[in-house]
Image: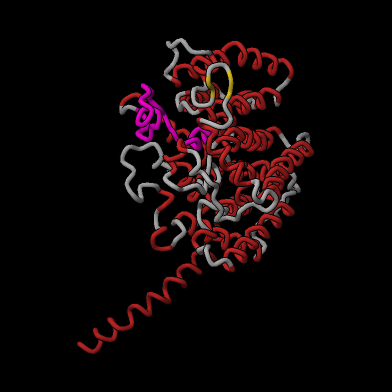
Amino acid sequence: MVQTISALFFTTPFLLALLVPLAGITWVVAGARSALLWVSLYLGCILYFPNASWGLIDRSDGSDFYNRATGTFFFSAINVLLFGLVLQALVGRAWGRLPPLRHNLRLAAILFWLILLGNVLLGSYLDDVYWYQIIGYSGLLNVANFMLGFYVFMACVNSPKDLDRLITVLLFCAVTRGLWGVFRFVALGGDPANVYANFQNLDIKLTFFDINDSLIATLAMFVAAWRLVNVKSLSVSAKCMYAAIIALELFIIFFSYRRTAWGGIALAAVLFAFCQTRGLRNSLLVVYATVGLPALLYKFTLRSGTSGQSVSFLERILPDVAQGRSFSLTTGRFAELYAAGLSIKESPWLGLGAWGKYDGSRFSELAWHRGDYGWMHSGVLHIALKSGAIGVAITVFVFFGLCRYVWRHRDSVPPAQRGIMMAGVAGVLFMLPNWLIGTPVIEYRTMQLMALCFALPYMAIAVAHQPKG
């Protein structure tokens, strides 16, 4: 008996070492048969969990959902799950269980993978560059994750019903999280990750500080509004439900107090208007101009905390970039962008590598970076710093490639799928301000939701063009 127990004790680590990869392989093979289910679970995690550490007073180590397991695996647990879903998609495609991927972004993907491979090879050769800087989240890792996420989302839909199920998951998560946001706003003082109240002493209460929650609200609101306007057979209860979703998600965005969110929803709203008939389009544009724009400008003044002070209107709505009646491109919010631009000039075509940093020490007002100058508030300049003008050109090509593909197929997609197609485009437009003056590339959640937005139009077009029968 003792010998048996000793043998089991000795062999258990080896059995576990064999069972873990065996379980992983089994999950990949079995999961390939139900790709939509696993992708829905993954998407649910992305939709529900925010990048919550920024703006909190108590920013304890590991408080961010997207940092979980980085101390053990280097990559976060959710990132490891993404890798697993990619393997599932590859297996499913090898078995012919998944539809072919039809899009016009292959060249851009190949070029960016070559840039990433070049970074790995060059970084490994340089003595002063460490491996974790090459594949760190402050470099280009999330660009790779974006491409992997795009592939996974594209591979999970095999029919119009699959696409509808995925959109149902999106709407359910958006509504339930939105209801939580409203409850917390009304009863619990709003989002605790409130950088304006916690660090700028402004009397502001937020729904969600994370820009991605406003993006999710925009996607849900666009789909709900599209169905409310374009589906003629809706029951009264369905119309009330979609109207309530629009009101809920608009509340989430309006009381996020994020200027990038307000600019993004304005772009998405204009796109929605131009997708409608001429009469409805003109009516919507009038409402935007007479109600929406004044309301946003009023909230701008409340957000700055200067509504009652004797300063210029420009300084009221943009206090961190305006001085008097003019913009300052070298101080305030733009100081880090100016510093990054000076460093990018050292290698404008290829950039400074995924490990590259700009010289921010010359600007005393950037001391809050605490020496971490590997990122800045601009996705475009981040790409330029890490991969130069070539990387920026590829990024622009991806944006225009999506628009070109949608424009080419706009009239051949039925209204049901067209709403989903345009919702994806609306999500991309919504994130444009954040790409200009935000931090999308260093945020895992942002890049995965961007991958979803980019994938939705291609998914909608693909299922719409499937042969009948």
* Position in image of residue 463 (x %, y %): 69, 45
Farthest residue in the bottom direction?
Answer: 3
Looking at the rendering, in which quadrant would you find the N terminus? Answer: bottom left
Residue 304 versus residue 343 in the image, above or below = above
* Position in image of residue 375 (x %, y %): 52, 45
- Is 56 a magenta residue? no
Residue 325 versus residue 45 in the image, above or below = above
Q: Nearer the viewer, residue 213 or 390?
A: 390
- Is 196 a magenta residue? yes
Q: Nearer the viewer, residue 327 or 249?
A: 327
Q: Which residues are magenta?
A: 190-216
Relative side of 308 to 351, left or right: left
At horizontal 40% and vertical 32% (from top left) the residue drawn is: 195
Note whether residue 32 is visible.
yes
At horizontal 37% and vertical 80% (from top left) the residue drawn is: 14
* Position in image of residue 435 (x %, y %): 59, 38
Q: Nearer the viewer, residue 156 or 112?
A: 112
Can you tell which quarter of the image residue 205 is in? top left
Can you tell which quarter of the image residue 290 is in? top right
At horizontal 46% and vertical 10% (from top left) the residue drawn is: 310
Note whether residue 241 is visible.
no
* Position in image of residue 460 (x %, y %): 67, 42
The mark total stands at 0
The type of colouring in the image is: secondary structure
Residue 358 versus residue 215 in the image, above or below = below
Farthest residue in the front direction?
Answer: 362
